[in-house]
Amino acid sequence: MSDLYLSYRAAQVVSRSLPRRFAYWVGLRTADHFYAGDHSGRQAVMANFRQILTQQGVAASEETLAQMARKNFQYFGKYLVDFFKFARFTPAGIQRLVSMEHFERLEQAEALGRGIILISAHLGNWELAAAILAAMGRQIHAVFLPQRVNKINELFQKHRSQRGIQCIPLGRAARGVMEALRRNECVAMLADRDFTAHQYPIPFFGKSARLSSGPARMAVRTQAPLMPTFLLRQPDDTFLLRFYPAIVPDRQTTAVALQERIRDVLEQEIGRNPLQWFMFDDFWNPRRNYEHVAIG
């Protein structure tokens, strides 16, 4: 049984058994422990922030970058607490904890009758965003990367299914995605990491990177609108669910054009909330590995 699985099981027990504020405190202290011990992860996060800030015209000091990296680890500690804490959202829970920004944009995209490709990133709490929409009566299918450890897969999938989310494994997702869209349902896809063999580098925060081309290619294939959607943590630990204007393809739209529009939204939202972007390897290093981020 892997140490990583035991860590997630411990996070599950703490999150479920303790009051939310106390669980957050434990999550923060655990995050500080990992921040201190994970030199490569810490340096990777600092490198990512340096690239983002440089593109924004900010020359950050090493001390500033280190402080930002520690905060990033802490936000992820809270993310894990919430992942395991909220088995299912109720209408009362949504009203208490979630603010909506431009929800009408989702309704307008639904009215097209083509299904919706919800695109997000490893930003804020993408898992709870899907759970909230499922609790509001939407049929949500999420494309996910299976983990190498079966017990971790089972643990995550159990929580997703409890929230009413139907999961489609990456690698054989095309058929499931297309069937869901034909039924005018929602498919959630993360657009900031490319785990496939496709090679479509694109400038991202001023430097070439590999973003997922899957959402753009699927939108061209199905003509489903792309709906950028992000759930951001607020200072009081409530959440803001933000909907961007739908990106609606037509028969002349290319995957490259859609990819560029997705990129622009990701740059805007990640640039606005870099501390909530959970990317624990060097994003712009083509030799990076994917061992640190284990959800999504």
Image (spheres, rainbow, N blue to C red):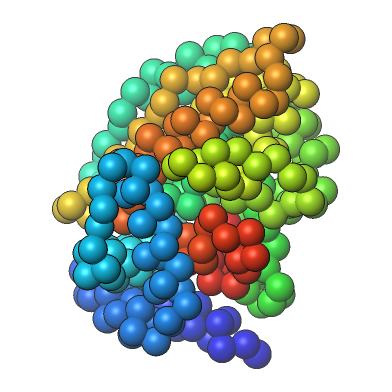
Q: Does residue 17 show up?
A: no
Q: Is residue 132 left or right of residue 224?
A: left
**Residue located at (77% from left, 23% from top):** 221
- State the image coordinates of residue 105 (x, y, percent, origin top left): 43, 19
Q: Nearer the viewer, residue 252 or 207?
A: 207
Location of the C terminus by quadrant is bottom right
Q: Does residue 221 show up?
A: yes
- State the image coordinates of residue 190 (x, y, percent, origin top left): 57, 45
Q: Is residue 17 left or right of residue 191?
A: left
Q: Nearer the viewer, residue 189 or 39?
A: 39
Location of the N terminus by quadrant is bottom right
**Residue located at (42% from left, 26% from top):** 244
Q: Is residue 87 left or right of residue 91?
A: right
- State the image coordinates of residue 100 (x, y, percent, origin top left): 31, 32
**Residue located at (51% from left, 45% from top):** 207
Q: Is residue 163 above or below residue 34?
A: above
Q: Nearer the viewer, residue 77 or 277?
A: 277
